[in-house]
């Protein structure tokens, strides 16, 4: 299977509960981007390594490894609407995102990100939904969790420990599938349920 086919098809659904975080991450690492392969503009926006001291421009920023762990725990693949959802939910889980921050992030992702990474209006709707979903979730701020302590834990045990409500995600994924029945990454999220 080629890398592009792996990107197109890879995801670990929420119904996968016993796989460990390390096992899931190993699968993703076989084809996923390395930190230095991520375009600089995206690193400047999304990686806290580039934050100015005392200024948190975009809440929920993470390094790539943490971002990948969040993909796994939220049951999302690595296609564009998956990215929009993971970024939005992570930002929302910080409980600190302002409307201005959301609009600025939307502008950057739509008009400044490279073509293969930029968000369409549909992607922005998924992002905005995810921000709100992350905000109403009782989970910990996903960007602040030290996932290394969980590497040998089964996925569902980690979700439970950090407060990711799979019922909340399943309910939203069902809505997303109805809104976007023609989009693969929106219709496969309920596999196994």
Image (cartoon, rainbow, N blue to C red):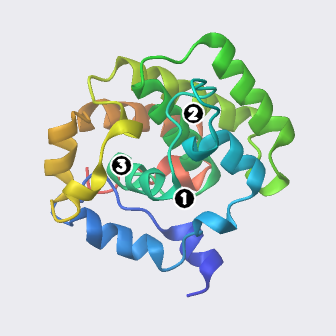
Q: Earlier in the sequence, mark 2 or mark 3?
A: 2
How far across and down, in percent of the image, does residue 104 sit? 74, 23
Residue 165 falls in which quadrant of the image?
top left
Residue pictured at 38% horizontal, 55% vertical: 69
Pick the front one: 115 or 172: 115
Residue 46 falls in which quadrant of the image?
top right
Pick the front one: 45 or 68: 45
In the shown orientation, is residue 26 left or right of residue 182? left
Contact check, label 2 and label 3, Cβ < 8 Å: no
Which residue is under mark 2? 179
Q: CA distance from mark 2 to mark 1?
A: 19 Å
Residue pictured at 34% horizontal, 35% vertical: 169
Task: Name the front one of labels 2 and 1.
Answer: 1
Q: Earlier in the sequence, mark 3 or mark 1?
A: 1
- Give the structural element (helix, strand or loop) at label 3: loop
How far across and down, in percent of the image, does residue 56 sit? 58, 26
Q: Earlier in the sequence, mark 2 or mark 1?
A: 1
Residue pictured at 37% horizontal, 68% vertical: 25
In the shown orientation, is residue 166 left or right of residue 100? left
Residue 181 shows in this picture: no
- Give the structural element (helix, strand or loop) at label 1: loop
Pick the front one: 159 or 94: 94
Image disc number at residue 78: 1
How far across and down, in percent of the image, does residue 132 sit? 47, 20
Which residue is under mark 3? 190
**Residue most extreme to the bottom:** 1
């Amino acid at each position: 299977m080629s890398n592009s086919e792996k990107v197109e098809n890879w995801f670990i659904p929420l119904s996968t509960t016993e796989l460990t975080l390390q096992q899931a991450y190993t699968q993703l690492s076989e084809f996923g981007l390395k930190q230095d392969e991520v375009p600089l503009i995206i690193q400047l926006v999304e990686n806290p390594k580039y934050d100015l001291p005392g200024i948190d421009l975009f809440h929920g920023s993470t390094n790539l490894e943490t971002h990948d762990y969040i993909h796994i725990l939220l049951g999302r693949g690595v296609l564009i609407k998956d990215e929009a959802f993971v970024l939005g939910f992570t930002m929302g889980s910080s409980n600190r995102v302002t409307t201005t921050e959301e609009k600025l992030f939307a502008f950057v992702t739509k008009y400044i990100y490279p073509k293969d990474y930029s968000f369409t209006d549909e992607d922005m709707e998924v992002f905005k939904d995810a921000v709100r979903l992350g905000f109403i979730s009782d989970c910990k701020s996903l960007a602040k969790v030290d996932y290394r302590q969980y590497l040998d834990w089964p996925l569902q045990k980690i979700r439970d420990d950090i407060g990711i409500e799979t019922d909340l995600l399943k309910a939203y994924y069902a809505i997303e599938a109805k809104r976007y029945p023609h989009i693969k990454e929106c219709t496969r999220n309920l596999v196994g349920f």
